[in-house]
Image: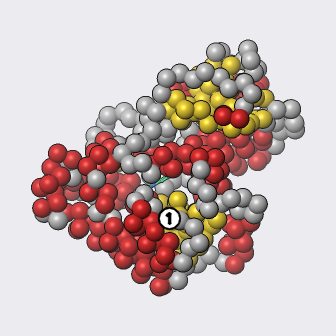
Amino acid sequence: MLTTSFEQNLAGAIEIARSAPSSHNCQPWAVHYSPLSRTGYLAIDRHRALKGLPSLENEMLMSCGIFFQHIETLMRNAGTPLQWTWFDESHTTPTLPQKQDGLICFSPGEKQAANPDAYHDLAKQIHHRHTNRMPYETTKLSALQQFRLQEMFADSPVQLNIWQDQTSCKQVADLVYQYAALDFADKAAWQETYSFIRFDKNKPVEDGFYLHHLFGKIPAYVEWLFRVAFHPKLNLFTRFLRLPQFMAHEFSKLTGQGPQYLALSLPDPNPHNLFITGMKLARVWLLLEQWGWGIHPLSVLVQHDLPKATLANTLGMTHLPIFFARFGQVKIAADVSPRRHLDSILTID
Ligand SMILES: Cc1cc2nc3c(=O)[nH]c(=O)nc-3n(C[C@H](O)[C@H](O)[C@H](O)COP(=O)(O)O)c2cc1C
């Protein structure tokens, strides 16, 4: 039962923020609020978090940061801001259920004037943002747009780099060709990825993604072929047929089209900074969305040490990237993917 305006607004904000992007659409977040103590927390739900590779922890922290950025801004626009601290620095750190790791503690801040227009605009942007893995228009970012993106990173530990030249496109395509097969090479990681691919469109689901999210519309027989050929139990057979190399080649052709790339990097990638990076990424993604642009993350280049270091070297980055994506003006609209229900995210006692 939601009794106060704070609780109602919190539930309303989470209802919108649950559309936040996350790796494999795993949505690894949990929120709890206790009206009695007037405190709450955001945690990583370990039942949901990816664990196929150690580096996926970075992506869990970033995903939760994106989700929290939406909630934080919506609550401010609703006139009921959150007062928040890191979980481990809070004086009243609550005990969490098993399999949850606290990230943020929060309580109601002082009420302020609501901004309903900003609230609705933001809700609309969050709702309309989708990962777009299709070819983009060749439009380049203007100097003003680059400035608008860069200014979000002033006074932050996160660095944003952007590339939009032909040489970088070729270099990224080569790196993707060289390393994309790593996705299939690690058995545990591929098993986990495969478990998030949904093949039955008639079965209700709340997470994961469909093949049309990756490849656009494809004939049913190709879906079936993919389902069988890339089944983790057939790993050796798939590798024998060099299917991962074929996929890497196709993927490299797409990613080499750019037309732009962005990287987020940190001199000190500790959990707090990774969470903050997620908060920044949420703002970047929505600003691009406002301009009619989409993002296609290319995590395979940052999840393993060798491609990550090679990418940083090749593109001349000062620090190792923790997020890398191609992006551009949307040409073909992307589809909405499933989401968890509010009741499974927020608990109130
Ligand atoms: C940190 C992070 C890493 C991601 N990495 C990839 C990736 O490597 N390839 C990809 O196609 N999508 C990637 N995604 C996008 C997710 O798959 C996507 O957010 C999720 O499936 C939900 O879909 P939506 O963004 O369209 O709502 C990533 C998202 C996040 C937040």
Q: Position of residue 57 (x, y in %)?
A: 48, 46
Residue 138: percent from left, percent from top: 51, 78
Looking at the rendered structure, the number of numbered marks drawn on it comes to: 1
Residue designated by label 1: 325
Q: Label 1 CB, ligand 1: below 8 Å?
A: yes
In the picture provided, is 245 more to the left or to the right than 109?
Answer: left
Which residue: 42% across, 62% down?
305
- Residue 47 lies, in percent from the top left, at 43, 31
Which image quadrant for residue 148? bottom right
Q: Is residue 124 above or below residue 328?
A: above
Name the one closer to the observer, 49 or 15: 49
Would you call the spot at circle 1 few (<14 residues within 10 Å), some (14-19), or many (20 or more)? some
| 244 relative to 326 in the view: left or right | left
| Residue 53 visible, this angle | yes
The residue at the point 41 percent across, 71 percent down is 255
Q: Is residue 194 visible?
A: no
Q: Quadrant of residue 256?
A: bottom left
In the rendered structure, which amino acid carries the disc numbered 1? Ala
Q: Residue at position x 61%, y 57% from top?
A: 268
